[in-house]
Amino acid sequence: QVQLVESGGGLVQAGGSLRLSCVASGITIRPYAMAWFRQAAGKEREFVAVSWRPSGGGRSYYSDSVRGRFSISRDNANNKVYLQMNSLKPEDTAIYYCAADRSAILSDYGRHGAYDYWGQGTQVTVAS
């Protein structure tokens, strides 16, 4: 059984930083694309960042709204993925989800339907 468990969310002041973690069990993440999505109240789930699988080039991709402020990294040896979030803004407030997929094509990296496995999410609240 595949499980993704996020942690690290919380309340932070605007301009602050948080580091989210996602630990996977039931899979070895090395061949997987590992992504972060978020969903704010009343809004659709949106792509944040992805660390693409090595067989597909292994690059990282970001949404326009977080590029330059957020950084995704992965620790394949420990089956973990991280999202370092700096210069946080109130509009970053959302539930953040970790996602994994082994077979998605690169052009689908921002589409939440492309990912097979999801965590339960962790709440991030940025106060103004």
Image: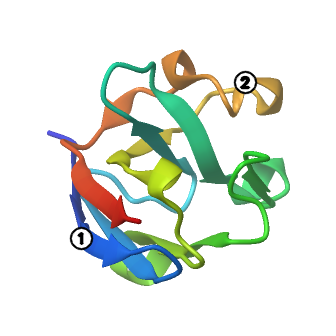
Q: Secondary structure under badge 2?
A: helix
Q: Position of residue 54 (x, y in %)?
A: 73, 59
- Report the Cα–Cα distance between label 2 and label 1: 31 Å
* Amino acid at circle 1: Leu
Q: Which residue is mark 2?
A: 108
User: In this view of the protein, can residue 80 be seen by the observer?
Assistant: yes
Residue 51 in which image quadrant: bottom right
Residue at figure coordinates x 77%, y 60% from the top left: 67
Q: Give coordinates of residue 78: x percent, y percent.
A: 35, 80
> 38 or 72, which is in the foreground?
38
Residue at the image point whose x is 42% and y is 21% from the top: 43
**Residue 33: x %, y % from top left:** 59, 47
Badge 1, how many Cα within 10 Å: few under 14, some, many 20+?
A: few
Q: In the picture, which quadrant includes the N terminus?
A: top left
**Above or below 57: residue 109:** above
Apparent side of residue 108 relative to residue 57 in the rendered image (left or right)? left
Residue at 40% x, 79% y is: 18
- Per the image, the residue denoted by label 1 is 11
